[in-house]
Image (cartoon, grey):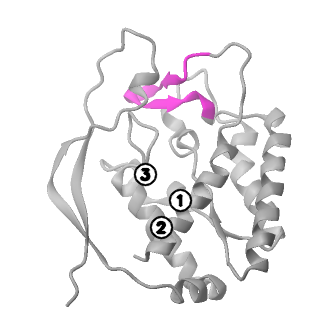
Amino acid sequence: MKKSLLDTVIHAAALIGALGATTTYAAEPIPGIVGKDDWLFYRYEMSDATDTPMIDTSLDLIRRFNSVLAANGITMAVTLVPLKMRVYAEHLPDDIKVNDVMRGNYDRISKVLRGSQINVIDLNTAFLNSAKRSSDTPLFYRLDTHWAPAGALLAGETIKTDIDANPALKKALGSTPEEGYKLVVGKRKINSKSRDLVEQLPKPVAVFAPEQTFAFDVNRATPA
């Protein structure tokens, strides 16, 4: 893994993170949503047509930022984080549905950016089509807003594949120093401590069964 790639992904995610969670409510409801099968969701992933102008403003800022980077010889790639609600819509409660805006926003945003000659790496398709989406090692934590290890690994692999397939991105990455890391995955599952959505529920909080995941370590590779 190259350090500059990680930095690029973090910066891009920070820049566009608000695109999928822009709704403002007059009377703030409880942020956490209890779905089916003890899946929890974050209310602020929900959006509708009223959010489009704000999203378009963000897209304009990204286009302008890309122009500044390009003028300085920097190639940018944008990757949008898939919505947990969309990837695991079958676990939403019956009174909450993925609407047309939420369903189509990822493709619309990607199309707008690509139309401005901005590189976009599509994680949404990879997440929706992954065999691990419905496995016992899901892509998102059941009780948390974040990717589970399987989701993080899928995102990294997808980004790397797209970079290798894009001459401009591959050239930009190839010109940076490389640092080697080693990923070691444990053989036994342990209880995960990732449960930030539990804290978003009204008190007293119901008891949720712990999630189990394979432990892993990422260490800097030792030079040969």
Provide the residue designation for mark 2. 6
Identify which residue, 133 or 178, lies in the foreground. Answer: 178
Question: First in sequence: mark 2 or mark 3?
Answer: 2
Question: Compared to 130, does 83 lie above or below?
Answer: above
Q: CA distance from mark 3 to mark 1?
A: 23 Å
Specify start and end residues of the magenta stretch as a single range. 29-44
User: Circle 3 is placed at which residue position?
Assistant: 133
> Dividing the picture into quarters, in which one does residue 163 lie?
bottom right
In the image, residue 46 lies at what x, y percent? 65, 33
For marks 3 and 1, give the one nearer the viewer: 1
Callout 3, which amino acid? Arg
Residue 32 included in the magenta stretch of the image: yes
Spatial separation of the CA atoms under disc 2 and disc 3: 24 Å
Of residue 187 and residue 65, the one placed in the foreground of this image is 65
Q: Residue at x 54, y 89 (%)?
A: 175
Q: Which image quarter is the N terminus in?
A: bottom left
How many marks on residues? 3
Image position of 4 (left or right of 172): left
In this figure, which residue is indicated by the disc labeled 1? 10
